Amino acid sequence: AGVSWEVGPGQPSGFAYFKLPEDRELDRQVYLDRIAMILGGRAAEAELLGTCYEGAGGAVGSDLHAASDIATMIEAQFGMGEGLSYFDVPSVEQRDRIRRDNPDVAARVERILRREMERSREIVGRHRAAVEAVAAALERDGLIEGAEVGRLISGRAQR
């Protein structure tokens, strides 16, 4: 028995919700890992389907927007990037503005995004069978919980 669902115009046909631990120290690698994770869907499209769809970057709050914001904070606010300059960019609008108005920051953000996209694609390629198993379960059931993802990735699926 399949899941019946509809997607209307302008709605995403799927999304991932990650509950991340909040009690750990957030260093540069944690932020880079989050960017790579956020870019995972787009990386899977590129790696497995040979193309990319607009969903990863189609709107404010999209995966590309979220990844760009984190990279902007690394480069312009946290002192974890190529430069040590501090810019006050606490809002989405301010981060968009600094990328638009400061070519140096924009270029540094783009370098982070490209490196993390390449890393994400490499991870997807290395774990292709697991990614395909998760996609098949999503197509079949419409929803998948973290424990089931863990079983599929480890090869211990119950189905």
Image (spheres, helix red, strand yellow):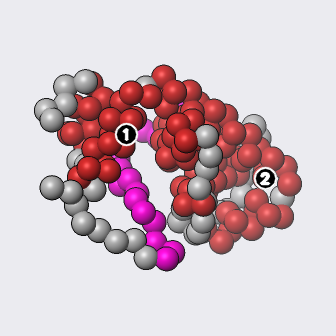
Q: Is residue 115 above or below residue 23?
A: above
Q: Position of residue 87 (x, y in %)?
A: 72, 58
| Residue 16 lies within the magenta run | yes
The residue that mark 1 highlights is 24
Q: Residue at x 78, y 51 (%)?
A: 105
86 relative position to 116: left or right: right
Q: Which amino acid lies under the numbered mark 2 shown in the image of this protein?
A: Ala
102 relative position to 71: left or right: right
Q: Which amino acid lies under the numbered mark 1 shown in the image of this protein?
A: Arg
Residue 116 showing in the rendered view: no
Q: Position of residue 80 (x, y in %)?
A: 64, 39
Q: Residue at x 32, y 35 (%)?
A: 133
| Residue 95 lies within the magenta run | no
The residue that mark 2 highlights is 106
Q: Residue at x 43, y 76 (%)?
A: 8
The residues colored magenta run 9-29
Q: Nearer the viewer, mark 2 or mark 1?
A: 2
98 relative position to 78: left or right: right
Q: How many marks?
A: 2
**Dot 1 alpha-carbon crowd within 10 angstroms: few under 14, some 14 to 19, many 20 or more:** few
Give the quadrant of the N terminus.
bottom left
Q: Position of residue 102 (x, y in %)?
A: 84, 58
Mark 2 / mark 1, whichever is N-terminal: 1
Secondary element at image label 2: helix
Q: Is residue 96 above or below residue 9?
A: above
